[in-house]
Amino acid sequence: KHHLLRTFWVGRGGWRDRQLPDGTIVWTAPTGHTYITRPGALLYFPGWKTSTGALRRVDGDLPEPAGRALRMPRRPSTRQTERARRITNRRAYCDTG
């Protein structure tokens, strides 16, 4: 779910991201907490230069797309409901076997 939130809940009051030249991304949550993700290639190739070169700096807030949150996919049912359905189906299957 966090991937969906970071994709669709951005802009003022939402998630923010900042990419560093080495490919590291600093995510800032609406709460102000920061999360850092580093390029996966560094795990396997620590000496590999993954610099993206000079990045164009964007100052200020980007305009928030209208209705972006409305496009966020919705689950047809909750995870709890789906889990209960799977358990019921599995028990029914085992009882008939």
Image (cartoon, rainbow, N blue to C red):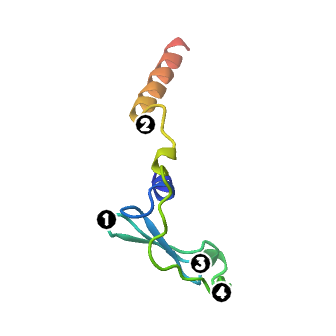
Residue 95 to residue 13: above or below: above
Residue type, numbered disc 3: Gly
Q: Earlier in the sequence, mark 1 or mark 4?
A: 1
For marks 1 and 2, give the CA distance.
25 Å
Residue type, numbered disc 2: Arg
Query: Going 44% across and 56% down the picture, which residue do you hit?
Result: 9
For marks 3 and 1, give the CA distance.
24 Å
Residue type, numbered disc 4: Gly
Residue type, numbered disc 1: Thr
Q: Earlier in the sequence, mark 3 or mark 2?
A: 3
x and y, in percent, of residue 21 in the image: 58, 84
Q: Are marks 1 and 2 in contact (CB under 8 Å)?
A: no
Query: Going 48% across and 80% down the picture, which residue do you hit?
Result: 59
For marks 4 and 3, give the CA distance.
10 Å
Numbered disc in front, either 2 or 4 = 4
Q: Earlier in the sequence, mark 3 or mark 1?
A: 3
Q: Which residue is mark 2?
A: 79
Q: Which residue is mark 3?
A: 23
x and y, in percent, of residue 15 in the image: 42, 64
Packing grade of label 2 (10 A; few <14, some 14-19, many >=20) is few
Packing grade of label 1 (10 A; few <14, some 14-19, many >=20) is few
Q: Which mark is residue 31?
A: 1
